Image (cartoon, rainbow, N blue to C red):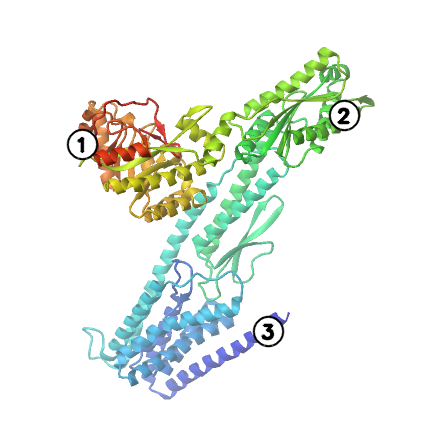
Amino acid sequence: MKEIRGRSGASRIIFAVLALIVVVLVVNAVAALWVGDAAKWPVAAAAVFCAGTWERCLLRLGRSAHLGIVISLPVLVVPASSSSFSPLVAAGLVVLGVLMVGIIRRVRPLIALYSAALAGIGAAGIAVVSLALSLGGVPSHPALAVGCAAYVFFVIGAESLRERITMGTRSEQRQAVSVVRTVGLAVLVGALALLSDHWSAHGLPLMSGGSAGVNTLIVLLLLAGVALALTAHTRKVAMRRRLLGLIEGTLALGATDMRAPSTVGVRGVEAASARDAAMETSLLLRRSISDTIGVQSVRVAATPPRPGEIGVAVEFEPGRTEYVIARRDSMDVAFTEADRSALAALAQTASAVLMARRNIGGLTTRANSDPLTSLPNYGAFHETLTNINEHREYSEALAVLFIDVDDFKSVNDRHGHAVGDEMLREISRRLLGSVRSEDLVARVGGDEFAVILTHLTSVEEATARAERLKVATEPPLVIEGISFEPVLSIGLAYSAHREADISSLVHDADRSMLGTKTARRHLGAKKKSSIAVSPHHSSYLNDVVVRAIDDDRLDVAFQPIVSLVNNQIWAFEALVRYSDSDVGTVSPATLVEKAKSLGRLDALTRQVATRAMAAADAFRRVAPTVVCIAINIEAVQMLPERVGTFLEELAARYPDLSLCLELNERSVERVPMEVRIQAERMRERGILIALDDYGSQDSSVDALVRVPMDILKIDRGLVDDLDDVRQREVLTALQSFGDSLEYSMIVEGVENQRMADHLHAIGVRSAQGFHYGVPHNQQRTLARLEKHGAAAIVRRVTTSLVAQDSVSAGGGTAS
């Protein structure tokens, strides 16, 4: 309360001071005109008009074209009327012009007074600065121009001070001022002031000889015309920005994922997904509004917008209407009908997207639910299990329970379907009540249920939780006056690690359930629910891959990339290798695929990249022509939170080497915008981007522009028959395309000199393949360089060609 009172008192003081400044300047100007020459009244009117036009022309000084401090230039009236009025009289005319604009625009009195006083103080300040410079020996015209230029910095200082006073510690701050824009505007203002002052005194070119009053009148009207033209231009730019913002905002909102959550039926997950969808849409909407209409802040509130703000109601979540409110600073351009229309259009798009998501979610829920018990059905169960398995930590355990209700068919036949249905509903309620919110219960058959138990640490814990579930379902239940004692056969399969094939876990749980049911039937066991634990074990190969990556056991092989111009090696491609004492050699494809499914792909990439860069540095010391090392990664791995930051720091440690990231064509099919931005960022830091295996699948020209790149690597599938003129024409076209788009081309799969000659004749400048060397480890590669230097071809006694493609760190294939 004290703070509010303090601000209210401060506002009254500021209002009084501003009003005093405005009154003094206006009274002084009117008095001077009243006692002066009446012939100057038309000039004074033109000065007021000119000041008003420049007050409406708002120029921005922020780093963004539509955000940041705004400035108007009514003080240009001072140099333009210097031949007719004194600086203080001109300042009064400026204040009058600014006040008239405030009245026409119906702005609040305090804001109108602030604008007028700021312009008046600035105009008076111009006189003070120019006088001081004149006393220092600076000619009057340049001195006045410098004073006008200083006005720009005066406004920035005043506005920054006002922000600090009015906003305090609030987070909604303006963008930083652009130094380039500020300096450029100051120079422009100084030039306009210099010309206006000169033309006012001596007349425009080809119009000299007129009186000072006529010259001043012409210059003022000319300046007003410039202001009107600038205002029209800024409005046109704003309209173009709104149009582009609407298009981009609509595309961004429409591109949100409308699929239902893949953990259907997990309590809390679907509600959380709806909240996440609402938050994502709210974030995109606020960002789109900010980019489209240019605002200081956009917020979501439960109350309607306040005066000076614009807003629209949006139902982000069913039954809860909120307002998306845009706010501009009080000194900024007032909101227009076009701004309101743009806001409404974006909000309507967001509402349509949210409604579509809810409708799709409802349809998906109905499609994935059992109508009798409302539990997830078998399809939803399997999808959820797959999702949980793929996104759990490698060492995070889970268990699957398959549950069968014994003798359910006899209940149905003896007592009718209504009794049987109620029994299933009650059992489903008991199952739900005995598991945690993050677990899942599903009905997967007529009398069969399945349960996913998550966040386990041991098979004993899984068994104990299954036992509690069994106990919860054992009490008798009474339906239509008949008492029933449910008997369940429960099969449990426990998974200690992420599964490469989750279906095997389901199969083992089902088999265990059938086993206990058969045993009870054949052995005449007592009619009580029972649990059978499957001997399921996670894949041993998974453990092998995890140990290889976590214990830093991976090997790297290197295949040369050569220049067809000088027949020298200029780069190597690093290829991952691993051999286990028990399993034997793990194929690169299996190694990479397992690493990906086990959440170890980034760790594999970091290990390969570290070894590759160190090895390349050793190669370069022996053969200075070796200046590049290539590794394969998936496009999404470039993001900073994946391996992007790590690779940037790694590349920076080897300034004499270029790191090349090869992206296979599959990984760039649906690449998000943030990946493209990151690719540009990495290129700016000297990291090369290559599109690998082009031509290996249904390649299209679109793939060449999805991600910024430096190198295009042609798959062997496009060069397997270079005697065919069509292949040669395709390569020629790709080489010409590459020259136009300024990227290099490397052809893979070169196996003999004839192929190399064809490629050289076409104009291809780099190649890779067994003709130049099979992949070898660092030691053998270094020995080759020490013996033969960077020669592209060395005489080999024997060469072992591997039929299978080598696979690199990120899953791409290499020749």
Which residue is pictured at 66% across the width and 37% down the height?
A: 437
Which residue position holds label 3? 6
Element at label 2: loop
Q: Position of residue 133 (x, y in %)?
A: 30, 81
Residue reaching furthest top?
Answer: 522
Query: In the image, what residue type sits under mark 3?
Result: Gly
Q: Is residue 493 above or below residue 143?
A: above
**Residue 680 visible in the shown view:** no
Looking at the rendered image, the disc whose residue lies closer to the viewer, 2 or 3, is 2
Which residue is pictured at 33% across the width and 44% down the height?
A: 687
Which residue position holds label 1? 760
Quadrant occupied by the N terminus: bottom right
How much space separates mark 3 and mark 1, taking CA atoms?
81 Å
Q: Position of residue 393 (x, y in %)?
A: 54, 36
Q: Quadrant of residue 304?
A: bottom right
Query: In the image, what residue type sits under mark 1?
Result: His
Which residue is pictured at 33% across the width and 74% down the height?
A: 148
Residue reaching furthest right?
Answer: 481
The 10 Å Cα crowd at callout 3, few under 14, some 14 to 19, many 20 or more, is few
The 10 Å Cα crowd at callout 2, few under 14, some 14 to 19, many 20 or more, is some
**Residue 88 visible in the shown view:** yes
Q: Is residue 594 above or below residue 253?
A: above
Residue reaching furthest left?
Answer: 761
Which residue position holds label 2? 474
Query: Which label's residue is closer to the chain start, 3 or 1?
Result: 3
